[in-house]
Image (cartoon, grey):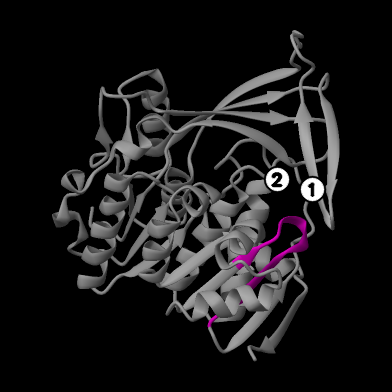
Amino acid sequence: MSLELLTIGSCTLDCIIDIEDILRFELLKEDEVKKYTAIEYSKKLNIENLRFFPGGSAANIACDCAMMKIPSSFIGMIGKDFSAKMCLDDMENRGVDISHINQTEKDRTAFSVILKTKWGKDRSILAYKGANDLVSPEDINQNLFENIKAFAWTSLTKEKSCEAVEKCIKLTKEKGGKVFGAPSMSIIKNNPKWADVLISNSDIISLNKEEAQSYTRKTDTIHMIKVLIDKGLDLVAITNGSNGSVLSDGKKVINSGVYDVSVEDMTGAGDAFMSGIIVATLNKYNLDKTSKFAAALGAFEARETGVREGIPSNFDMVEDFIEKNPLEQVMTELK
């Protein structure tokens, strides 16, 4: 199989816990409100439900795009443990080429505990990065990039792992492929130098509003977009949960709402949104259609509990969904 998409970043086993006997409180700081989930000190709590789902942003993107019939492979690092087997089996079942995944005995596969409470669809996450950040430039097989059309990176934070991402970016550009970045708060806060290097060398970036605010140090979305476009990016996407998204190619700005679907779980919706942008870009969709396709994949993901669970395996199902469901959009000039 000639690969068209390679992804690098996190591959994680997610443990989703439904819990009701938990506290929530809010703290006000000037004009900012912070919300916290709390467990009473030295107290044992019962959980309502427990489920395991393979996840991780880079692995999610590879799976989502593979299900959209784009030949894809994840080339990050995982451990050699029971979590790794679950992750590998799931990726392979979804059509991802798993023959190029790096594995190590130096650390365990990444693991996340996702706490779902009775207060809406948002969630708190306890994340163990594990083997993700152990990937290095020496682990990257440059022959994989011969026919590559797209490379997507998600947050790695260590020096060697960031160097591995940089190497992948250079190899992709040498072959005329597009570079897609989905930096999380972990790299923006913990390694801002590398965040800037990798974002500046990407073609297309997707962040949520909190990430964009932290990186650009701006509070207005248009100002955030201008800072990112000035980095030389071709396309910038900023998502804002139930408030929709903003996309800009440096000339036009399109504000989109969200599709009216029953939301079960937002975990992985941002990765699905980025996957939609990748699929749309490879299909040469315009800005309007790109926004709709990305929002549609995000909506499919949000309808099911667990990452990847809602993504259809039929490309035409997404097109049919877009055709039959309205999406509020406003397009303006970027001034």
> Quadrant location of residue 15?
top right
Specify the amino acid type for callout 1. Ser
Front residue of 131 and 27: 27
Specify the amino acid type for callout 2. Arg
Residues at marks 1 and 2 touching, judged by CB atoms closer than 8 Å = yes
Tell me what residue is drawn at x 75 percent, y 61 percent: 259
Judged left or right of residue 175, residue 276 is right
Helix, strand or loop at disc 2?
Answer: loop
Q: Is residue 99 above or below residue 276?
A: above
Tell me what residue is drawn at x 27 percent, y 46 percent: 160
Q: Position of residue 266 (x, y in %)?
A: 68, 45
Q: Residues within 10 Å of mark 1 (few under 14, many from 20)?
A: few
Tell me what residue is drawn at x 45 percent, y 79 percent: 234
Judged left or right of residue 19, residue 217 is left
Count every numbered label the image shows and give the total: 2
Pointer 1: what residue? 262
Q: Residues within 10 Å of mark 2 (few under 14, many from 20)?
A: some
Question: Which region is colored magenta?
Answer: 238-249
> Quadrant location of residue 264?
top right
Q: Position of residue 40 (x, y in %)?
A: 80, 17
Residue 248 in sight from this viewpoint: no
Front residue of 302 and 161: 161
How far is mark 1 from mark 2, CA to CA? 6 Å
Instruction: Tell me the tag on residue 303.
Output: 2
Q: Position of residue 236 (x, y in %)?
A: 54, 72
Q: Is residue 175 magenta?
A: no
Q: Is residue 80 above or below residue 144?
A: above
Judged left or right of residue 273, residue 119 is right
Q: Quadrant of the C terminus?
A: bottom right
